[in-house]
Amino acid sequence: MKKIFAILVAMSALFIGLHMAKPVDAASAKTKYVTASALNVRTGPGTKYKVITTIKKNQSVKVTQTKGSWDKITVGSKTGWVSNTYLTTKKPALSKTMYVTASTLNVRTGPSTTYKVVTVVKKNQSVKVTQTKGSWDKVAVGSKTGWVSGKYLTSKKPAAPKNLAAGLKTVGSNKQLILVTSNGYNTSSADIHTYEKNSKGQWVPVLTATGHIGKYGFTANMSEGGKKSPIGKYTIGTAFGRKANPGTKLPYRRITSDDVWVDDPTSSLYNTWQSRQKTKGKWKSAENMNIPAYTYGFVINYNTKRIPYKGSAIFFHIGTSYTLGCTATSETNVVKILKWLDPKKKPVIIQTPIQELNKY
């Protein structure tokens, strides 16, 4: 009897031991996916065992054995144990490419407007959506990740921007071009595009930016003080600024507190840059040049014949809102354009409502 009892005890122990490890046949090994951002793979089923490798979120593994809350896995050429708290059988959704529909869109550290902004993406920019929580999407853009409102994303790829310079008939001898276009005459908002002609005679886009023109938009009939910007094609004049030359190849003039631009239509100095002290008494009105908007800029050669009352002091300069007749954009854009402009390439600027661009 004792022998029979001993045999039964041994068989029971063997049976229990076999079922505690729950081995899985290779043919029925289960695929699971990592839910933690990083998960340590260890030599045994517990945190006291040595880490042999680390696996990342959404990575797939083959589970071949389970011991309590630990799974033995195979990943690549390695095997080891991981906490199955951080594994799921649910296959993660693949990241999908989406495109921004808003002009600018904040990327935040979490899925609501209460979280900090980490970066900003622009219209038509592509992002990779890796997760969704309600109306918010987690995106990867460049080296950064964050959350954006999903209502400003679309899966529809935007059409390639049209090359506005292609087909223009009046710029055959020019190799650099600035286009300032608006949607009609009665808006102060404008789009700014720069192009350079390649060796094949094709216009290649260089910079695209938003900008501003006169408070009351464009006009074909300029008048002094009208707060409108002139339409037309113009050459580029002197570059200027209140600081040292930022690197432009254009002739550069540094502004001082003595500098003014005469805007008195009755003066013989109308629409010219003058010294306040040297020309005192020769005009009744002149614009002070030493202002923040003119930290950097260049002269648009408008009304070079200086016809009285037809407008003066038309510049391309720094600004964040409507102007009194000039064209403005951010300081970053102004400096980029100044560095790019090369008088040897005969640069010109065309200003027009987009609907009338075909006139040029």
Image (spheres, rainbow, N blue to C red):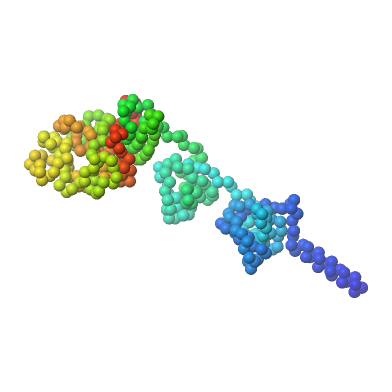
Describe residue 140's horizontal placement relative to residue 47 as left or right: left
x and y, in percent, of residue 53 in the image: 61, 59
In this view, which residue lies farthest toward the bottom? Answer: 2
Instruction: Using the image as rendered, state which of residue 261 and residue 256 is in the foreground.
Output: 256
In this view, which residue lies farthest toward the left? Answer: 281
x and y, in percent, of residue 83 in the image: 64, 61
Describe residue 335's horizontal placement relative to residue 290 as left or right: right
Point 26% across, 32% down: residue = 234
The answer to which quarter of the image holds residue 39 is: bottom right
Image: 15 above or below 183: below
Res 38 visible = yes
Instruction: Using the image as rendered, state which of residue 278 and residue 97 is in the foreground.
Output: 278
Image: 81 above or below 90: below
Query: Which quadrant of the rendered structure holds the C terminus?
Result: top left
Image: 47 above or below 253: below
Point 77% across, 62% down: residue = 19
Point 36% across, 32% down: residue = 197
The answer to which quarter of the image holds residue 310 is: top left
Query: Which quadrant of the rendered structure holds the N terminus?
Result: bottom right
x and y, in percent, of residue 122 in the image: 42, 44
Point 8% across, 39% down: residue = 282
**Number of numbered discs:** 0
x and y, in percent, of residue 299 in the image: 23, 38
Res 351 visible = no
Instruction: Using the image as rendered, state which of residue 272 and residue 67 is in the foreground.
Output: 272
Image: 121 above or below 305: below
